[in-house]
Image (tube, grey):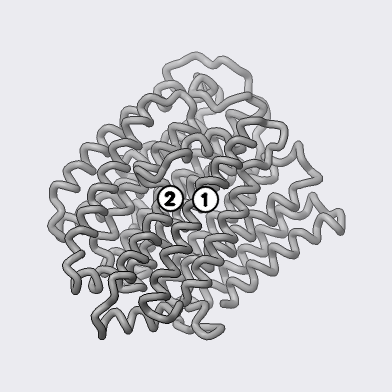
């Protein structure tokens, strides 16, 4: 609870920088503030508590995922310094939006009441709508903002309808009471229907097939830093919230009482396979790097959805996979921001010869792509290994075989970008070495490798 209050206060403080005309200091001071919030969050680690009539609950799950969100926000705020240097009068607004988005993400994994769950979704979503359309003079950004708003509003409506049905079945919004009732009584049919609607709404937020619709268009049209935020922080928040939703509301045992468990599991398997396959096949055809990573994110959402099949035991695996994926994404987008700065697009041609003109950034981008593909020694390999092992133990061998095949397919489009960096001749001069972009890229890929060498640093946090 203290973490959420501190984040909200920091967001308000960021807005005051505009009034005080201290725009140059906003990025370093915000980073320092977020480091303080991270320390406060670690101080709460291991404790369990509830606040405001159980609206907010503190647990290992909420504190560990909140810590991940805070770290990712630190990286994204650090990248803001260079990305928004042409809009100095608005940087306080952009940074404040990212901090408020973080507050929504923390609320989404700390909810003890469905009202707080929905409030967190709306805080996060509204910030994303604004950021997606923040490049006012760019028609693609305007289109991205409108499409994301329509898609997000539709998903929010479905979620809200599901919450209403659950309230009608249970007579309460309190998650603990809903969990207790689901263990001790025969449930009305409105409960599983409401849960299914909420899951469908969250699958829109995760951008899983067939609910991905305009997600690639939004990723391509949004400013590059906003795309980085959507691809890493927003996606990790959505998948962690979906996981907690299924676990906290006791969906699987309650479905078992009504012979619906098999149907739920089959649907999860189908959506997981569809997301992995469609995401990878469509990514093979892309020439725009942001659009390619959008389809890659859809594929990774399919992998992470596999944790719903073993929801009682896979929180540690989900945390590890989310961390590995997000760190690789931050490293990749750091390089993309540098390479595509002042360019009209983010096509692969912009990366031609990067291995010759800037070997360090080319190596970092290569490492992040190899991690996403699941190549050792990067943490992305071990994330898939642990996920596949747990899924096999649960008896879903066919699903794992499809996932392995999709991992092999993904190598094709990741290596297309890698080959462009090392086998093509440079087609543009790149000047300057922005410190923060280099720092974020190096730190994030280093953390990715460290977690690959020592996976227990993350896996043991939720055991």
* Left or right, 195 with reference to 288: left
- The residue closer to the viewer here, 264 or 384, is 264
Assess whether mark 2 and mark 1 are in contact (beta carbons under 8 angstroms): yes
Coordinates of residue 434 in the picture (x, y in percent): 66, 38
Regarding mark 2 in the picture, which secondary structure is present there? Answer: helix
In the image, farthest residue toward the right: 20
Q: Residues within 10 Å of mark 1 (few under 14, many from 20)?
A: many
- The residue closer to the viewer here, 87 or 454, is 87
Residue 132 falls in image quadrant: top right
Q: Is residue 291 above or below residue 451?
A: above
Q: Quadrant of the C terminus?
A: bottom left
Please name the residue shown 26% across and 82% down the image.
183
Please name the residue shown 32% across and 64% down the image.
193
- The residue closer to the viewer here, 388 or 15, is 15
The image's mark for residue 116 is none
Please name the residue shown 23% across and 51% down the image.
269
- The residue closer to the viewer here, 234 or 165, is 165
Q: Is residue 292 above or below residue 49?
A: above
List the residue tagged with mark 2.
Answer: 204
Residue 52 falls in image quadrant: bottom right
Look at the image and tell me whether residue 450 can be seen.
no
Please name the residue shown 66% across and 55% down the image.
97
Work out whether mark 1 precedes mark 2 in sequence or the reverse, and give the earlier one: 1
* Left or right, 419 with reference to 217: left
Q: Residues within 10 Å of mark 2 (few under 14, many from 20)?
A: many
Residue 147 falls in image quadrant: top right
List the residue tagged with mark 1.
Answer: 152
């Amino acid at each position: 609870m203290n973490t959420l209050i501190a984040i909200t206060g920091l967001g308000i403080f960021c807005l005051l920088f505009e009034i005080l005309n201290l725009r140059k200091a906003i990025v370093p001071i915000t980073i320092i503030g977020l480091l303080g919030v991270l320390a406060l969050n670690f101080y709460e680690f291991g404790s369990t508590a509830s606040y405001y009539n159980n609206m907010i609950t503190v647990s290992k799950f909420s504190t560990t995922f909140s810590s991940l969100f805070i770290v990712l926000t630190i990286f994204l705020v650090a990248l803001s310094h260079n990305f928004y240097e042409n809009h100095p009068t608005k940087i306080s607004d952009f940074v404040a939006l990212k901090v408020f988005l973080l507050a929504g993400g923390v609320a989404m994994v700390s909810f003890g009441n469905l009202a707080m769950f929905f409030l967190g979704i709306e805080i996060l979503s509204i910030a994303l709508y604004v950021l997606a359309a923040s490049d006012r003079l760019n028609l693609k950004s305007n289109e991205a903002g409108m499409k994301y708003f329509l898609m997000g509003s539709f998903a929010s409506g479905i979620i809200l309808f599901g919450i209403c049905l659950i309230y009608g079945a249970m007579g309460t919004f309190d998650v603990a009471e809903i969990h207790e009732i689901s263990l001790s009584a025969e449930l009305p049919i409105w409960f599983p229907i409401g849960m299914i609607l909420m899951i469908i709404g969250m699958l829109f937020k995760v951008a899983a097939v067939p609910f991905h619709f305009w997600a690639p268009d939004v990723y391509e049209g949004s400013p590059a830093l906003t795309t980085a935020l959507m691809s890493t922080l927003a996606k990790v928040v959505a998948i962690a919230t979906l996981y907690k939703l299924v676990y906290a509301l006791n969906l699987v045992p309650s479905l078992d009482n009504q012979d619906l468990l098999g149907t739920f599991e089959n649907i999860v398997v189908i959506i997981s396979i569809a997301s992995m396959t469609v995401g990878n096949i469509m990514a093979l055809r892309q020439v725009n790097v942001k659009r390619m990573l959008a389809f890659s994110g859809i594929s990774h959402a399919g992998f992470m959805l596999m944790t719903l099949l073993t929801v009682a035991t896979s929180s540690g695996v989900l945390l590890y996979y989310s961390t590995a994926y997000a760190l690789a994404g931050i490293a990749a987008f750091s390089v993309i921001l540098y390479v595509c700065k002042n360019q009209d697009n983010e096509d692969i041609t912009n990366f031609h010869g990067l291995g010759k003109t800037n070997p360090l950034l080319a190596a970092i981008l290569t490492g992040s792509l190899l991690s996403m593909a699941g190549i050792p020694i990067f943490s992305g390999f071990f994330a898939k290994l642990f996920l596949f092992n747990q899924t096999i133990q649960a008896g879903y061998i066919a699903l794992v075989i499809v996932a392995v095949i999709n991992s092999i397919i993904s190598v094709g489009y990741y290596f297309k970008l890698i080959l462009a960096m090392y086998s093509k001749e440079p087609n543009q001069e790149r000047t300057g070495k922005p410190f923060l972009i280099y720092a974020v890229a190096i730190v994030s890929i280093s953390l990715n490798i460290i977690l690959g060498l020592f996976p227990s640093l993350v896996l043991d946090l939720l055991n």
